[in-house]
Image (tube, grey):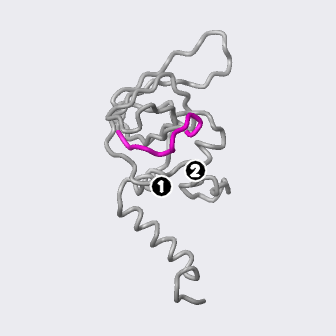
Amino acid sequence: MIFAIKAEVHDLRAKTFTFSAQKTMYGGKRIAKGDAIFVFASENEGGPGLIASGVVTSATALPRTRGIDRQTPRVSVAIKRLALAKRRLGRGELKPFAAWNDGRPETELNFKFYRQATNKIVGISDQAAAYLRRFFSRAGAREDRDMEDRAHPQDRPGVSQ
């Protein structure tokens, strides 16, 4: 499984990240050492959104507190950064994708991270992971521009319908 985390990040260019007692949702409690993960610096704490991809170097589930019926599972994780994002992806870019059943990876990310604005670790689909990988290469930016041109040919100079 592939994961993403939205959390407060103090050093956006750190080679390693450590996050303690993070909430988990949408399968996030299954995170384990060796899993791929995308790191979003939470806009709630002034971060820009997607900043890095990496691999989980440790994951420890926290025990539940006795006497509390409804608890969100929490996990502490350490992550080794593998790449820095080449372009921006945050709440502003994902907000337009709110048709919850459209099957788009952008909508999945918007739903999982921003429908409830709390910081958390989430499991993501292979499609969402492929979408996020495009933010780590210059080729991904070109691919997005090409897709946009094909989707809206009337917006290109010299093209009429």
Rendered location of residue 55, percent (x, y): 34, 37
Query: With respect to residue 9, does 146 lie above or below?
Result: below
Rendered location of residue 60, percent (x, y): 42, 22
Query: With respect to residue 107, does 64 lie above or below?
Result: above
Query: With respect to residue 57, does 98 lie above or below?
Result: below
Judge the density around disc 2: few (<14), some (14-19), many (≥20) Cα neighbours within 10 Å: many
Query: With respect to residue 53, does 132 lie above or below?
Result: below
Q: Amino acid at mark 1?
A: Gln
Q: Which mark is residue 108?
A: 2
User: Who's the residue at 61% across and 10% down the image?
Assistant: 66
Q: Nearer the viewer, residue 31 or 94?
A: 94
Q: Nearer the viewer, residue 57 or 154?
A: 154
Q: Is residue 64 left or right of residue 86?
A: right
For residue 159, which quarter of the picture?
bottom right
Q: Which residues are magenta?
A: 43-54
Judge the density around disc 1: few (<14), some (14-19), many (≥20) Cα neighbours within 10 Å: some
Q: Which quadrant: the N terminus?
A: top left
Q: Nearer the viewer, residue 20 or 126?
A: 20
Rendered location of residue 127, percent (x, y): 47, 55
Rendered location of residue 93, percent (x, y): 57, 55
Residue 47 colored in magenta in the image: yes
**Do labels 2 and 1 touch, CB within 8 Å?**
yes
Mark 2 or 1, nearer chain start = 2
User: Who's the residue at 32% across and 35% down the image?
Assistant: 15
Residue 99 colored in magenta in the image: no
Q: Nearer the viewer, residue 46 or 101?
A: 46
Q: Which residue is mark 1?
A: 127
Q: Which mark is residue 141?
A: none
